[in-house]
Image (spheres, grey):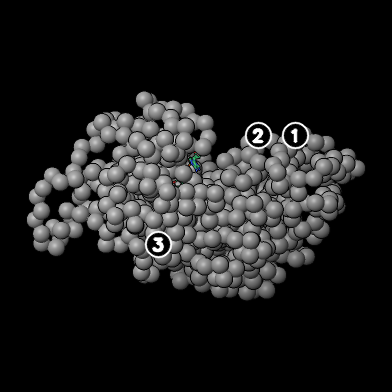
Amino acid sequence: MPDQPTPLPYLIIDFDSTFTQVEGLDELADIALENSPEREKIVGQIRALTDRGMSGELGFAESLKQRLALLPARREHLPLLVERLQGKVSESIRRNRSFFEQFPGRVYIVSSGFREFIEPVVGEFGIAPEFVLANTFTFDKDDHITGFDPDNVLSRDGGKIEQLRRLHLTGPVYVLGDGYTDYQMREAGLADRFYAFTENVARPAVVAQADKVLPSFDEFLYQNKLPMSLSYPKNRIKVLLLENPDPRAAELLRQEGYQVELVPGGLDEDELVERIEGVSLLGIRSKTQVTARVLEAANRLIGIGAFCIGTNQIDLTECLKKGVAVFNAPFSNTRSVVELALGEILLLARRVPEKNALMHAGKWDKSAGGAFEVRGKKLGIVGYGNIGSQLSVVAEAIGLQVFYFDIAEKLQLGNATRCRTLAELLAQADIVTLHVDGRPENTNLFGAEEFARMKPGALFLNNARGPVVDVPALAAALRSGHLDGAAVDVFPYEPKTNDEPFESELRGLPNVLLTPHIGGSTAEAQRNIAEFVPERLMQYINTGNTQQSVNFPNIQLPEQAAHRLMHIHHNVPGVLAQINQVLAAHSVNILGQYLKTNEHIGYVITDVDKQYEPALIEKLREIEHTIKFRVLY
Ligand SMILES: NC(=O)c1ccc[n+]([C@@H]2O[C@H](COP(=O)([O-])OP(=O)(O)OC[C@H]3O[C@@H](n4cnc5c(N)ncnc54)[C@H](O)[C@@H]3O)[C@@H](O)[C@H]2O)c1
Ligand SMILES: O=C(O)CC[C@@H](O)C(=O)O
């Protein structure tokens, strides 16, 4: 946050759809009509009238009169309404409650809504009744709401203008609101600025008149160098999402208040270099290569979300050196890949790819040649991680005998047999399936030699990563008849978009199933990923939590009522000591401190007393070997 506070101008804040997310009268109608068959219809009519009044299409007094005439509300409904509105205060206003408490006497609520429900809601924020200027209801002797006090200036057209005039405020006056009547105070020359508040509703006619548009109250505080609960407004955080992750991802990130831009398909290095400037969060899948050059151009990048399992497309070490945390979805699509692999094994064993092609060509080839049951056959799983081990369990259930080979020590599941070498596995498996990760050392893990070691007539599957297999060698093993069939979902080069043709030596070979990298492409997996990855990114931004980051030291942090400072530095001796010296020199009390390092970086989270001088932040930034420093809250 900028550190020089300016004197607070008078703030005139609208209530309905600004201070709260909703319109009070709409909600009152909803409550009053709870058991009425007409509820939906009448609430709809009231909403339409509210909108016409707010956008300036219908005179305000007329809109209010027509709305109240439709409203069958009673005094007893008001406490229910207040309770509902207290739960619907706009998010950014709610989180900056302490701002309102700090500046009593500078904030007025000027509203054409009703005092009966506004006062108790804003009162919780320290705004006293004399700073609430609003209409009042009239009631009949049976406590039915009959209308509004016509002597109240706010019930008339131009009422807000007249009300503000009567306040005789001296000094700068800023108006924040979502409606045309809010803008009119500025138009009448009574306010210095009109901020269109769009967190809940953005009315084009109102936005068009604004001096500034505020997607959140944080943005107002930030622009005016006023104290705020967040260190940086969320609406300034730009997210670039590539390769079409499930729409739920954009929805969640937008709900958080971020600006989200979507680019269908992937971008090549040059294109990404051009687009990455100013981006705080990048979301990709398996195609986009995040290279050192891309990272060099990424001047604001904080985190990358890989909406998939594999992260070999990202230069993880370079990310570390730039202080960019990377998160993926390590098991959201595991089951989908397992189901595809199992299906492929069954189809290849019955030569379905070949029979299917013949049938489509009008050829009836009923024969048992080359078809076998998988029951009792040996399945060799190379890479016994999340997918390999899950496949092991499912494959045993249909009678396959499982053998596996992994370079790491792995828990043996069910009746699976561990092979000590790849050669041992290849020598006995009837079906070999690859589930290793895409680390550079695995390039061409399977070539002519490995295929030659496989049993004649064996089947081969690659649902892991394209470069792991030498495709010409696989094609040769299939053409020679040494292998009886293969299923391949991943390729060393994959088309960037669905419009680009697919080229491969495997095309046209019999009993070969080719799929366009869809192992994890199921509705379930994509939805799981789209929830998992944004959650990790948001947690990192909001709390510094790096649990499950694929490159950062993993720290799971407790919540703390404090200021939280995040410091990422090159892993050299003495940086923590320097941080603590700076804190001590500014008499700042450390409430908690968490440090983890890896071979490249040190990651320190420090929770400190609420009170500190802005100069402290500068000193922490200046510490030698600092890669990134952020005040989280
Ligand atoms: N086709 C798809 O759409 C799709 C979907 C999801 C995942 N994947 C890919 O599947 C692969 C496995 O995913 P996962 O979630 O099980 O990963 P994982 O990290 O849980 O498991 C990988 C395992 O392979 C082992 N391994 C690495 N190199 C090896 C080698 N040379 N020999 C033997 N074992 C080796 C590792 O020790 C680890 O146990 C990854 O490459 C991933 O990118 C593909
Ligand atoms: O959806 C993708 O692009 C990749 C899927 C898969 O390979 C993964 O790594 O999870």
Instruction: Using residue 419 as the reference point, say whether residue 362 is left or right of it.
Output: left
Residue 104 at x, y percent in the picture: 74, 49
- Mark 2 or 3: the one toward you: 2
Identify the residue at horizontal 55%, vertical 45% (top origin).
536
Question: Of the residues tagged 1 and 3, which is closer to the observer?
Answer: 1
Amino acid type shown at disc 1: Gly
From the viewer's perspective, is 354 left or right of 14? left
Q: Secondary structure at mark 2?
A: loop
Q: Earlier in the sequence, mark 2 or mark 3?
A: 3
Task: Decide: is 273 above or below 34.
Answer: below
Occupied quadrant, residue 595: top right
Q: Which residue is mark 2?
A: 558
* Residue 360 x/y as whole percent: 15, 60
Which residue carries the number 1 mark?
Answer: 592
Quarter of the picture holding the N terminus: bottom right
Q: Residue at x 72, y 46 (%)?
A: 601
**Marks 2 and 1 in Cβ contact (< 8 Å):** yes
